Image: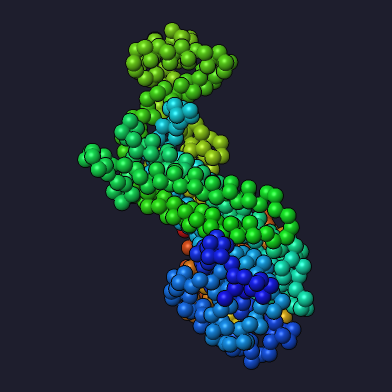
Amino acid sequence: MALWGGRFKEKASVQFKKFNDSLPVDYRMAVQDIVGSIAWAEALTTVDVLSQDEFTRLKAALLELKASVEENPQQILLSDAEDIHSWVEVNLIEKTGDLGKKLHTGRSRNDQVATDLKLWCKETGGEILFALVSLQQALLNLAERESNTVLPGYTHLQRAQPVTFGHWCLAYVEMFDRDIGRLKDTLYRADTSPLGSGALAGTAYPIDRDLLAQNLGFRSATLNSLDAVSDRDHVLELLSNASISMMHLSRFAEDLIFYNSGEAGFVEMSDLVSSGSSLMPQKKNPDACELIRGKAGRVMGSLSGMMVTMKALPLAYNKDMQEDKEGLFDALDTWQECMEMAVLVADGLKVNRARTLAAAQQGYANSTELADYLVSKDVPFREAHHIVGEVVLAAIEADHALEDFSLAQLQQYSDKIEQDVFGHLSIESCLDKRVAIGGTSRTQVQKALADIQGNHDSLNAQVVGAPSKIQISSALKQVKQRLNAQKAAAMSVRRARMSDVDNIFALTEFWAEQGEILPRTRDNIIHDIQNFVVAELDGKVVGTASLYIYQTGLAEIRSVVIEQNAQKQGQGRALIQYLLEFAHQMELQQVIVLTYIPQYFTKLGFNLIDKSSLADNIIEDSEPSPHKDPNDEVAMQYMVNRASITP
């Protein structure tokens, strides 16, 4: 049944119907369409279009339909419905009769599809965020595993200077971290509800659109109906996010394809991500990486196509916009699949450390060190550059490394060269001189570890023992801390909204009655809602925590509680890490907690402190639970700019 047939005398042709129908693509938004329909039915109830009994019947039918779709989404494709909205409405009418025909009152397919798509984007964006974090974790694991592996660094595909394999891994961790930031920004901007905008001019019914938006999980309603129904910026941004990230994945793949080649021989890929030749039995091809590289072009093509589609559309909705979903769905599917494949590649990668070291020692990668050595002997750099160029030319003709020259031979090029030059030409020296932030030197590692541990003496002992194994410790520590904050976001931890007040109150009241936390009144929660964060599972609030700021630089974490049946899934840890990241962004210096379970907070980077050292107002605000022994409560602190969270 078409939703628009009354104005027409003839039926559409079979050819046009096939050309026009979008069900084969937009059936993937069935759940979102049903969820949006339930929210719309409730909104119609508030303006007396539907009675409470009618809403109850519609909601029950829609939930039944939702369960059926979740169990077997492919059933939708057996229908000849025009789109997913028609399919849902037809099935609803079959279940409820004429009542189902009332649901579309005040609503257009224009605001309906815009809402469905934003809901889908939010949900899928969360899944992709988690995939990005998982990929970062895989690369971080590889970086730790190969932290002492020397690798030749390249510019122009020519050996340039030695780095560590771990340092190479962390370059991609940085790239994917920027991808995470872009995705989070995109999802924030997409978090507005178009529902209630009608076809283009708004709905004629006095519906509270902000309440409707909150019921659907959006932070607010859109502000302009013309823009709301014709906005596809979130589609373009997600396609842009995917394209940039796929470019990063493609570079990662290309590096490994080269490293895996017979000419380099630096790595061997797992059999799990490789294939062979139908003709040549000796071949082991890096097909996973080649496919990642190839699929990047398809994703970028989707972005180009959508940009061209949108570039000249007049306000408001146009049927051209129906083309938004096919490219988007394919691009995000491809992006996620490629990230999962990259994790498999990283997890199974074997590095030929002897081969990478030998390659780093070839190609005169220590030439810059010789030039810097001459500079330290008061030779101007441009002159030193020329001298070293002559030395390299001679080394090439003699077919040996710079360090294989005798002192007398080197002194033929400059009398400034002395016996100490050989200490500057080693691979270790090349690595250790990278003292600036972002390098891999021992000095930089020592500084970072000293900031974390506050103990220079014990640090020096560790470095002397095994310097090469901790060359990238500083970067790893910093990445781990940031990675944990991203994990918190991926686990659906977010800032609390006013619509969360009842859930927060129920959680805190339950655990206060158990004696685990101090009680919070509902009015107190409303007043402090901006200080709360919540954790969600399947769209339901299952945990909460708050950050109470006492003064400049000092805050306390309070009321960390998780619903009983949602415990031991990482939500509590994610809540705390989210608040610690927030404290960092707020430029706080110290976060404290009063707790009966110090071992839990120790794992998160907190240290015990003397409870009596806290200001009187802190102790007064956090009086002990009547159900606990006051002597069991301890004070702990987290130094925001120094500590590092263990993942």
In this orientation, which residue lies closer to the viewer: 209 or 645? Answer: 209
In the shown orientation, is residue 593 left or right of residue 265? right
In this orientation, which residue lies closer to the viewer: 102 or 610? Answer: 102
Residue that lies at the very extreme toward the bottom in this rendered image = 53
What residue sits 57% from the left and 15% below the top? 382
In the rendered view of the protein, which quadrant contains the N terminus? bottom right
Query: In this picture, is 7 found above or below 189?
Result: below
Q: Position of residue 220 (x, y in %)?
A: 70, 68
Residue that lies at the very extreme toward the front in this rendered image = 9
Model colouring: rainbow
Q: Classify residue 284 by image quadrant.
A: top left
Residue 145 seen in the figure:
no
In this orientation, which residue lies closer to the viewer: 323 or 493? Answer: 323
Query: In this picture, is 50 found above or below 427?
Result: below
In this orientation, which residue lies closer to the viewer: 182 or 373? Answer: 182
Query: In this picture, is 594 found above or below 628?
Result: above
| Number of numbered discs visible in the structure rendering | 0
Q: Position of residue 421 (x, y in %)?
A: 44, 20
What residue sits 26% from the left and 42% below the top? 277
Q: Position of residue 317 (x, y in %)?
A: 69, 61
What residue sits 57% from the left and 87% below the top? 96
In the shown orientation, is residue 280 left or right of residue 80? left
Q: Position of residue 569 (x, y in %)?
A: 46, 70
Residue 128 seen in the figure:
yes
Q: Classify residue 314 by image quadrant.
A: bottom right
What residue sits 44% from the left and 26% below the top? 158
Residue that lies at the very extreme toward the left in this rendered image = 281
